[in-house]
Image (spheres, grey):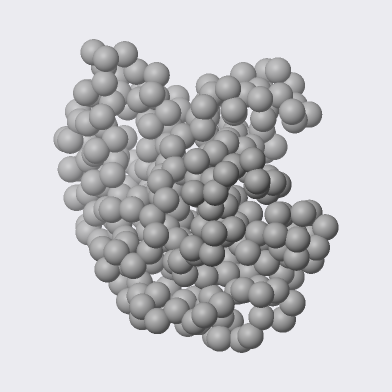
Amino acid sequence: MIEKSKINVNWKVIGHAQQKLYLESAFFGNRLTHSYLFSGPPHVGKTALALDFARLLNCENGNLCGKCLACVNPVEIFSELIVIDKDTEIKIDEIRSLKRDLALKPLSGQKKVAIIANAENLNRESANSLLKFLEEPQKDNFFILTTAAVGFLPQTIVSRVQKINFSPNSKQETEKHLNSLDISKAITKQVLELAPNKIGLANILSKNIEELERWRQQDMELDDLFSQSVFERMQYTSQISKLETQQIVNIFKTWLILSESRLRQTKQKDMKAQTDFIKALNTALMHFKSNLNKRLVLDNFVLSF
């Protein structure tokens, strides 16, 4: 481990001091591996730190100087950086295209970096295609996968990457970031109520009033769901079963994020109910990923908590 005092990397991401120090040590100590997995709660800065790290790998001054081409070029024209970031299924054609891009020699930088955000969305074919690439990486190619659901990834992939775990942001970090923005105190209060430990989500909600209102609505529906009888829950799921599966998945992912934030503030006597609900959400999401019958998944969900 190198001394922290000798490092002056200008990270843009807030928090995650240990993760930054680990990456700095690997970078400056020539102990880089070709594949990393950033695992932890959604919206805490995993992908943002992956982008910072990708730029550090190619920074002309080796410290995220903010002046060289690697540091200032937008992702869209930074040819050494390839990003797949989507909430829906990642298909094999996207991994094949990624491979073709990585096969090209770097133009201006020293290394080519591929970031696959929400890697749990890889389907079986795309995961197998990626695995072959991870097994025999090219010298100047690096992969960074991010996920909030490492259990959804094939163990064959998890075993071939260097895993770095992330924790939620502190409420103080989130509040400090919000206070640095040009938003009202009322918006800051609403955002903190929904995302006290997720700076990434707080940033999104603070800049998009419509999205903030959608999350507030989902939060109220979550309250209703907890107070309803099983019969009322079945009526509710009967209504949402008419939606497309991806729409339901998006609702469940929103509930999962809100529930995990609530769990950190839950009293001990109420913790089991909240934990059971989170387990039910995770199970339902796994069943949706396995393409099980939509109505059956929903019925099992409401009977699980």
**188 vs 47, nearest the viewer:** 47
Q: Residue at x 21, y 23 (%)?
A: 272
**292 vs 119, nearest the viewer:** 119
Furthest residue toward right = 67
User: Is the residue 178 above or below the residue 66 in the image?
Assistant: above
Q: Residue at x 66, y 25 (%)?
A: 176
| Any part of residue 264 in sight | yes
Residue 33 position within the rendered picture, expressed as x and y whole percent measured from the top left: 46, 66
| Any part of residue 243 in sight | no
Q: Residue at x 35, y 50 (%)?
A: 149
Residue 232 position within the rendered picture, expressed as x and y whole percent measured from the top left: 25, 28
User: Is the residue 226 above or below the residue 6 in the image?
Assistant: above
Quadrant of residue 91 in the image?
bottom left
Residue 116 position within the rendered picture, expressed as x and y whole percent measured from the top left: 49, 64
User: Is the residue 2 above or below the residue 120 in the image?
Assistant: above
User: Is the residue 242 above or below the residue 36 in the image?
Assistant: above
**9 vs 288, nearest the viewer:** 9
Along the horizontal axis of the image, is 133 left or right of 286?
right
**83 vs 237, nearest the viewer:** 83
Residue 114 position within the rendered picture, expressed as x and y whole percent measured from the top left: 54, 69
Quarter of the figure that contains the C terminus: top left
* Count of numbered badges drawn on the protein: 0
Along the horizontal axis of the image, is 135 left or right of 56?
left
Q: Residue at x 54, y 24 (%)?
A: 171
